[in-house]
Image (cartoon, grey):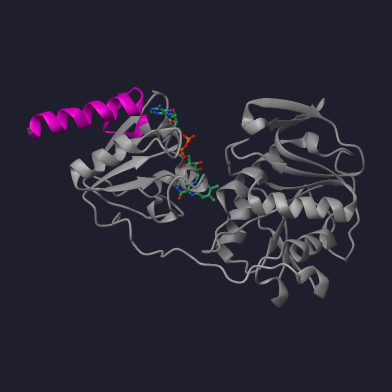
Amino acid sequence: MTMVFVETDPAGEVTLTSAEALTFARKTPQLLPDGGAATSREVSGPPSGSTEGVVIGPLSGAAIAALGRLGVSVIHHLDHPDLAEYSAAAWAQAIVDVAPESGTLLASGTPRGMELMAHAAVRTGARMAANVMAADEDGLLRQVHGGTAFERLRLDGDLQVLTIAGHACTPEETTPVTPEVYDYDLTVAEADLATRAQSTEVEAADDAAGLTSARAVVGAGRGVGSENGFAEVLELVDHLGGALGVSRVVTGLGWRPHAEQVGQTGSRISPDVYIACGISGAIQHMAGIEGAKTLVAINTDEEATMVQRADYAIIGDLHEVVGAVNEEIVRRRG
Ligand SMILES: Cc1cc2nc3c(=O)[nH]c(=O)nc-3n(C[C@H](O)[C@H](O)[C@H](O)COP(=O)(O)OP(=O)(O)OC[C@H]3O[C@@H](n4cnc5c(N)ncnc54)[C@H](O)[C@@H]3O)c2cc1C
C-alpha cells in the first residue's frame, strides 16, 4: 500500500505538489515492494487500499472530492487541537500512528513534506530517499545537485519513506471514487510540541490582481521558464493596461502569488482578450477562462490544447514573440 501525506492550502484545497505526489503514487506500481500485500498499523483503522491519503487539520468537502478525482480511496483524517498549528514532530508522529508497516509512505518534496518524512523515517526506522523522480524494477531514481545529476538507489526493509521531486509528474485525475474518510482518536505527546508554528499568515484572497475586472489579461504558464522569466509578459500587461494571470504551476512553484492564479482553483475571468503565453491548456485552467471573448495562444507546441482552442495562435518562443509584440507597440505609439 502506498500512503501519501496530502498538503492543503489555506483555502482548504489540495496543493498542486500533493496532486503530483498522488498521481506519482497511483501511476508507479513499483512503489509496492510486496505487491500491495495487507499491512498493519499502530492504531486500528481501515483495511489497506492501494493509494491512501493522510490529511492533518480541517478537511473540506472540496478536498475530499478532489482526492477522489485523484484516485484516493481512503483518507486518514488526523484532527486534534494540538495539531492545529504545524509541528514537525507531532504531525510526523500522527502520520506514523496510521502509517502501514510495509509499503511506501511518501510526500511531495516541499519543505513540509521533507521535514515530516524525515521525522517519520526516524520514528519508524524505515529507509528514506528524498527527491525521487521515478521508480521501476531497478529501484528508485532521484535527482541530486539541484537536478543536474541523477542517482539510482534501492531501499531495504518493509517500509520505504520517500519525497517526490517537484514536477516529477503532471497531476492527472482519474475515474472519480468516493473516498472513505477515517477519523482517529489521537494522543499528542507534550514532548512532540516543543517546536511548533506560532501562527499562519494568509495572503489576501480578494481580486488584488485586478483579474476579474481587467479587459485584457496576459496569462503566463510554466513556459516562462523561471521566476525571472516574466519581464516580457509584464511589459505587455503594462502596454495593454491589463492584468497578469498565471497557471497553477506558476503559483505552485512560488514564481507568482496565488492571487494571480486563473482556473478551477483560482479566479474565473471574462476579459475581452486572454493572451495565454506558455500555458498548455489543462482542463482546470480552461475552466477559468471560459468567459474570455477572444483567446490568443503563444506556445512552442502546436499540439497544445491551448493552441487548438485559441482563436489566434502564434507558434514560437514566448520571450521572442512577446518581446517582438512589445517592440511593435512601442514603435507604433512613438
Ligand atoms: C485539483 C487540481 C486543481 C487545479 N487547478 C488549477 C487551476 O486553477 N489553474 C491552473 O492553471 N491549473 C490548475 N491545475 C493544474 C493543471 O492540471 C495543470 O497542471 C496546469 O494548468 C499546467 O500549467 P502550465 O500550462 O503552466 O504548465 P504545462 O502544462 O507544463 O505547460 C507549459 C506549456 O508551455 C509551453 N512552453 C514551454 N516553453 C515555452 C516557450 N519558451 N515559449 C512558449 N511556450 C512554451 C509548452 O509547450 C506547454 O504547452 C489543477 C490541477 C489539479 C489536480
Residue 141 position by quadrant: top right
In the rendered image, the vertical position of residue 35 relative to residue 108, given as above or below: above
Residue 45 placement (x, y as % from top left): 84, 64
Residue sitting at 38 percent across and 55 percent down? 267
Total marks drawn? 0
Residue sitting at 84 percent across and 62 percent down? 97
Q: Is residue 308 magenta?
A: yes
User: Visible in this render: residue 187?
Assistant: no
Relative placement, left or right, of 170 versus 163 is: left
Overall secondary structure of the magenta stretch? helix
Q: Nearer the viewer, residue 103 or 227?
A: 227
Q: Is residue 35 magenta?
A: no
- Point out the residue furthest to the left here: 334
Residue 312 position by quadrant: top left
Q: Nearer the viewer, residue 246 or 198?
A: 198
In the rendered image, the vertical position of residue 96 relative to residue 244, given as above or below: below
Residue 232 placement (x, y as % from top left): 30, 34
Residue 88 placement (x, y as % from top left): 73, 61
User: Visible in this render: residue 259?
Assistant: yes
Residue 101 placement (x, y as % from top left): 90, 52
Residue 302 position by quadrant: top left
- Tell me the magenta residue range: 307-333
Q: Quadrant of the C terminus?
A: top left
Residue sitting at 36 percent across and 64 percent down? 206
Q: Nearer the viewer, residue 245 or 70?
A: 245
Residue sitting at 33 percent across and 22 percent down? 315
